[in-house]
Amino acid sequence: MLNKSLIHQAAGVIHESRNIVVFTGAGISTESGIPDFRSPGGVWSQYNQDDLTYQKFMSHEKYRKLYWAYDQARYPAMRDANPNAAHEAVVEIEKSGRLLALITQNIDGLHQKCGSSVEKIYELHGTVMEVTCLECKARWPRKEIVEKMERENLEVPYCEYCGGPLKCATIAFGQALPEEVLMDSFNHAAACDLFLIIGSSLVVQPAATLPLQAKRAGARLILVNLSDTPYDSLIDIIVKGKATQAMRSIMTEFRKLSGLSS
Ligand code: NAD
């Protein structure tokens, strides 16, 4: 059962804010059928994390094969998923003219699928929807490479331009985060007046320090999440609950405050 007073407060703060950063994690997409990292029985639990590092990928063909097998196993759930009411709420915040940036730890492409503007989205951990050459940095839509792998019966694809190994455009363990995306994200966190977190455990670094940056710069913080996070004591309003239900309720109140019918 959602706390009505907190829903009202959250809607009020969103309504008052002019430069909102929305920060999303795996929890916004679980209700679209994509398990988060910490659920048992997911694709992740079938593989040893230590074999899937960037360094292992670069070191030997056998690890590249393993990585591609893991990645191809998790990909269909993301490719076929549909955005939910929480993704829609983020689009609505953008349409109200208040969205400064949408920073996501997710790799599933659901914000784009839902209609959030590409130029507002900062994908800290990359995307499963594209493939990149680790040598010359050429990029392709994932679909193209998957079709080629099927056609040519490849376990590992290589770059048609430079021969370098291709990998999905996500950030593997041990791989550096995209510097520009990270810098822009920290700058936006420092410039926002509201930092709204939806569905993140806030344990993955350095992304989890973004709320701290926002707080230090004077922004208010709202968290919509099912479980506790290490930063709960810093958060101004915590709405404990499922992202879809919570964001639907918050946006209903927001519309009332904006003089729009719900
Ligand atoms: P996480 O798995 O660490 O935490 C998810 C959080 O969401 C948890 O605190 C959980 O309580 C909460 N949650 C789960 N379902 C929820 C719901 N319906 N409503 C509200 N809260 C809910 O995820 P994270 O913080 O994003 O970080 C882990 C890493 O997982 C990231 O690096 C991310 O790239 C990766 N990941 C992404 C996806 C995706 O793209 N959808 C899926 C799995 C993992």
Image: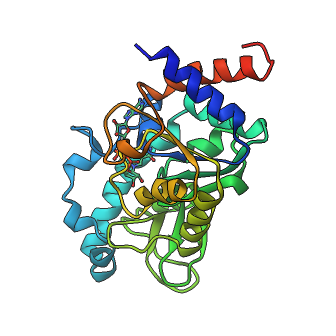
Is 35 in front, or is 74? Answer: 35
Is 175 in front, or is 66? Answer: 175
Which of the 4 image quadrants contains residue 188?
A: bottom right
Residue 129 percent location from the top left of the image: 55, 54
Q: Residue at x 68, y 24 (%)?
A: 254
Is 212 in front, or is 73? Answer: 212
Residue 43 percent location from the top left of the image: 28, 45
Quadrant for the N terminus in the image: top left
Is 16 in front, or is 27? Answer: 16
Which of the 4 image quadrants contains residue 157?
A: bottom left
Residue 225 can be seen in this image: yes
Residue 145 percent location from the top left of the image: 53, 62
Which of the 4 image quadrants contains residue 187?
A: bottom right
Q: Residue at x 58, y 67 (%)?
A: 181
Does 135 appear above or below 236? Answer: below
Residue 91 in the figure: left or right of residue 104: right
Quadrant for the C terminus in the image: top right
Q: Residue at x 44, y 42 (%)?
A: 235
Residue 253 percent location from the top left of the image: 65, 18
Does 134 appear above or below 260? Answer: below
Quadrant of the image where one finds ligand 1 = top left
Does 22 appear above or below 92? Answer: below
Residue 83 can be seen in this image: no
